[in-house]
Amino acid sequence: MRRFSLSHGWRSLPEGRDAGKKRVTAVAVVVLAALAMVVGQLWYLQVLEGGYFLDASDKNRIRIRPVAAPRGILFDRNGVPLVDNRPTFTLSLIPRELPRDEQGRDAVLGRVAALLRIPYAELAESITRVSLDSFLPVRVRRGLRLEDMAKVEEWKLELPGVIVEVEPQRTYPSSRFAAHLLGYVREASDEQLKQGRYRRGDMVGQSGLERLLDEFLRGRDGGERIEVDALGRPVRVVQQTEPHPGAQVVTTVDRRIQEATEQAMEGRAGAAVVMDPRSGDVLALVSTPAFEIDRFTGTIDRAAWLKVVQHPEHPLLNRTIQSQYAPGSLFKLVVTAAGLQEGTLTPLDRVHCSGEFQLGTRTFKDWKEDGHGTVDLRRAIAHSCNIFFYQAGLKVGGAAITKYARAFGLGQPTGIDLAGEKFGLVPQPRPKRGRDQWQAGDVVNLSIGQGPVLVTPLQVAKFMAAIANGGVLWKPRLVQRIERSERGVVWSDPGKVTGHVELSPLVWAYLRQSLVAVVNEGTGVEARIPGLDIAGKTGTAQTVANSRADRGQDHAWFAAFAPVRDPEVVVVVLVERGGKGGQVAAPIARKILNAIFFEKVAAVEIAG
């Protein structure tokens, strides 16, 4: 049995103390090292990275939301709005505030889809186009109803990242009012975003004046710095920057005349232009059928879009500048001007019209089967005798006819500031034996505005305006001036003369007298208005060979100006497949002129 030795025990005591001291020292070193690491980390976080984490914290607490600037207003020449803005509700998603896990995010989007009847795929797609860390709202559906907004607010606590914003949205006098002239506004497309000029969600003019003047109309957006709580709910507005509205635009359009022209063209496919021959101001520009502007401003699904695009009457087409037609008998005025100025025609020239004209083996017919009898130039214009102009065209010649057609601005753009304008076509002679030669049959067709010659309704308006004003070719003007509230007028258009048609004053006077005869005693009598002197010309343009106006196969034209002595307006009407110009287009022009000069006409009726 071992005994405890006092001497041995005292001898082992210093070794135990050393081991304890080592253990304490080791623990102290570890603690000090850990403390140093903590201090170092705190120093790193507070000093080196303090600004970064302060900014990150601020971002978690502060939200920056853009406030859309109202687009500028388009006014008519009398200060009446053509388009305005109204506040509407917009459903937006804030990606950073949506649930971070995919399952939670899908649940929120599914709830929104069920509440507002929005396709889930549309909501999901809108989020995939942006970063999930973005605090900027992604607009999903504009133009929400009040009850839709109430549903979102009711379920707000279960819909993190879903907000309803109030934004200005375009509003129109009617859904199709001046659709091709004003154009429509939509959210910037992916292609437009690539240009770097727009942010996602920006509303951008896509056609018409909205597109032409988008730079001025868009204005400058404002913004809000909003403090939110842990659930992302707004607590208070920390800072606010007011948006700057877009510029105000004063156009040349007369809203009353635009509305009257649209009413006159209702139910017809075609175009109508009203222009001031003294300045080139466009008072009305109508293309029918038109599209519903407000449908394009909001969200339009693929099926609805395809329905419009594939519509057989092409409502998106601006027929005033983008459709080209044979001018028909309107072109007889070019032949008359060329012949009288060149001396190959005289007012005393006479032709017997039997209803047919023989040229070699070909027979060219008049629109009146039994003919017009013996006619002179004035009567040939008034009654639109084809037989007279077949022979007149051969006298004048194709080269002279096309020379004066180009002088009147045909076969070239008018210069109007709308996109997509067509040039029309003034034909060239056919090459034969190494040189260009006019074939007699081509000249005969050309003389009555048939064959390859093509014009747009706006070109006809510019042409008729030159006859009304004595040869001045004005560039069609749509915008008078652009104004900003803080700077006044920032841009203005004084009007521009693009050329002159050089004809003798006697020739101009003869043309105007002949056009008066058209309305008072000829094919344009359906345009007559008691108390208003009108000069005009009818036209019936074949659409295909051997087409017939009485079967609705021909395009109907009527171009006029009034009052005759001091012309204030030019009115051009084109009805596709309408039939005869005098029976279809002339009565429409009468309605338009009646609306324009209703005070003058009413005064005459009262006096009578």
Image (cartoon, rainbow, N blue to C red):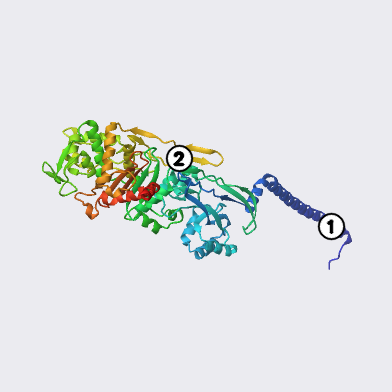
Task: Identify which residue, 292 or 513, lies in the foreground.
Answer: 513
Left or right: residue 296 compared with residue 511: right
Give the label on residue 438, or none: none
Residue under label 2? 480
> Does label 2 or label 1 sit earlier along the sequence?
1
Left or right: residue 182 compared with residue 490: left
Q: Position of residue 312 (x, y in %)?
A: 31, 55
Residue that protrudes farthest toward the left in the picture: 361
Left or right: residue 511 compared with residue 78: left
In what element is the residue under mark 2?
strand
Residue 397 lies in what quarter of the image? Answer: top left
Would you call the spot at circle 1 few (<14 residues within 10 Å), some (14-19), or many (20 or more)? Answer: few
In what element is the residue under mark 1?
helix
Q: Position of residue 531 (x, y in %)?
A: 34, 46
Would you call the spot at circle 2 few (<14 residues within 10 Å), some (14-19), or many (20 or more)? Answer: some
Q: Position of residue 465 (x, y in %)?
A: 34, 39
Task: Identify which residue, 97 or 72, lies in the foreground.
Answer: 72
Residue that protrudes farthest toward the right in the picture: 6
Task: Identify which residue, 542 or 256, lies in the foreground.
Answer: 256
Residue that protrudes farthest toward the bottom in the picture: 1
Residue 457 lies in what quarter of the image? Answer: top left
Q: Is residue 103 visible?
A: no
Q: Is residue 44 visible?
A: yes
Residue under label 1? 12
The quadrant of the rendering that contains the N terminus is bottom right
- Nearer the observer: mark 2 or 1; the answer is 2
Q: Position of residue 477 (x, y in %)?
A: 40, 40
Amino acid type for the residue under numbered disc 2 = Gln
Amino acid type for the residue under numbered disc 1 = Ser
Q: Is residue 1 above or below residue 580?
A: below
Q: Distance of mark 2 from mark 1, alpha carbons? A: 111 Å
